Image: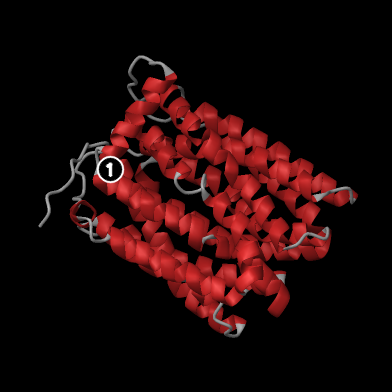
Amino acid sequence: MLPAVLRQERQFRLLFFGQLLSVIGDRMTQVVLPFAVLSIGGSATDVGLVAAAGFLPFLLLGLIGGVLADRIERKKILIASDAVRLATQAAAGALLVSGSAEIWHLAALAAVFGAADSFFQPAFVGLMPQTVGAAHHLQQANALRGMSYSAGSIIGPVIGALLVASIGEGGALIVDAGTFGVSVLCLLALRPRVVERAAPEPFSSDLRGGWREVRSRSWVWSVMLAVVVYHVIVLPSIWVLGPVLMEDELNGATSWAVLVSAFGAGSIVADIVLLKWRPRFALRASIIALIFASCQAVIIGSGLPIAAIAAVEFCAAIGVSAFFTLWETSLQEHIPEASLSRVSSYDYVASAGVMPVGTILAGPVAEAVGIHETLTAMSVIGVAAALLVLTVPAVRNLPRATALGTAAPDPAAP
């Protein structure tokens, strides 16, 4: 039987199925793009630079995207973002197919893609509660969203590897471009609940208003600091060092596809559990999950056979999916809807926006001290940061909300 949120929330159902194919395409590209860089003679540092180009726009545009999404209709922002990303993927694919692609081409197009994504993400987080009518459905909605990412992580790499083998990296990116067209068509049919918005203030005032929502809640800003560490230190193991290690020591794209697919399977297990299990302290559970999520890097660099690495990554993936689902649910439950996109934009800037620092440095550091040593250090730092945040009383004791957008003060220390 379908989860209640899909049976009873028509607008969420439309949003969910509209994004599903696009997510699969994105997960396919996660495998294709690093090997596209390597296929035209790029190095580990080049892979990091192209990845960084895709994330850097969050640092520059993420906060602007959050303000705009709290000012104007979020659906329109999503449609415009998907249209731009369709064009960039099609252009990158055409350059690769024609044999004229250079590293700077892929980096520049990744930057444009990232710019469009900078506006999409805050708008999407703000739009989701507008498609859900009941607070108790919100965690289910986030779990299903996470499940779509997890399923995409299984299906996407397999499709990506098959497309690379059959039509090359360029053809695979052109296929991804088509998924954004499907997303646009579904968004055009969406009719989300209207959110009451205050009269627009000067941009700087709106920006400060979002920051006030963040800094007034220690559970928000402290978790954001942990998210920074996770994205800057741990995730470059996925975006940069993992593919390089697979290429150098195992079977390249095939091994990486196996690993990413196992990760997706573990994520699905977590998402299925979260469709039913509603922890009393969602944020506390999310940080415990982050501890396990931060072990990804050391697992990848363990030197075990690919089957063993995939099996352990399956377990780490449960932590990753649980963390993001429960963290976003906590934000959506407690942050007022009229401010949610601005708060989420600070979250994305604190994660994807600063991730280029890690992706740029990961390659040179690994070349200097060793790739396995670097991967181990990534996990040690990530786990330490998560444990530190778990000592914050407001993080451990944040209650569940009974209505969407309920503003919650910091819980008292026990």
Residue 398, percent from left and from top: 20, 51
Give the residue number, with chain letter if any, for mark 1: 333
Q: Residue at x 48, y 45 (%)?
A: 16
Please state which of residues 378 and 247 is positioned toward the viewer in this rendering: 378
Left or right relative to 214: residue 372: right
Q: Secondary structure at mark 1?
A: helix
Left or right relative to 301: residue 384: left
Q: Quadrant of residue 43?
A: bottom right
Residue 84, percent from left and from top: 66, 34
User: Please, what is the three-letter code of the amino acid marked with disc 1?
Assistant: Glu
Q: Can the viewer see residue 3?
A: no
Q: Residue at x 58, y 31 (%)?
A: 79
Left or right relative to 128: residue 403: left
Q: Quadrant of residue 208?
A: top left
Q: Quadrant of residue 303?
A: bottom right
Residue 370, percent from left and from top: 62, 75
Q: Can the viewer see residue 82?
A: yes
Residue 198, percent from left and from top: 33, 18
Please state which of residues 58 and 364 is positioned toward the viewer in this rendering: 364
For residue 187, above or below residue 240: above
Q: Residue at x 26, y 56 (%)?
A: 282
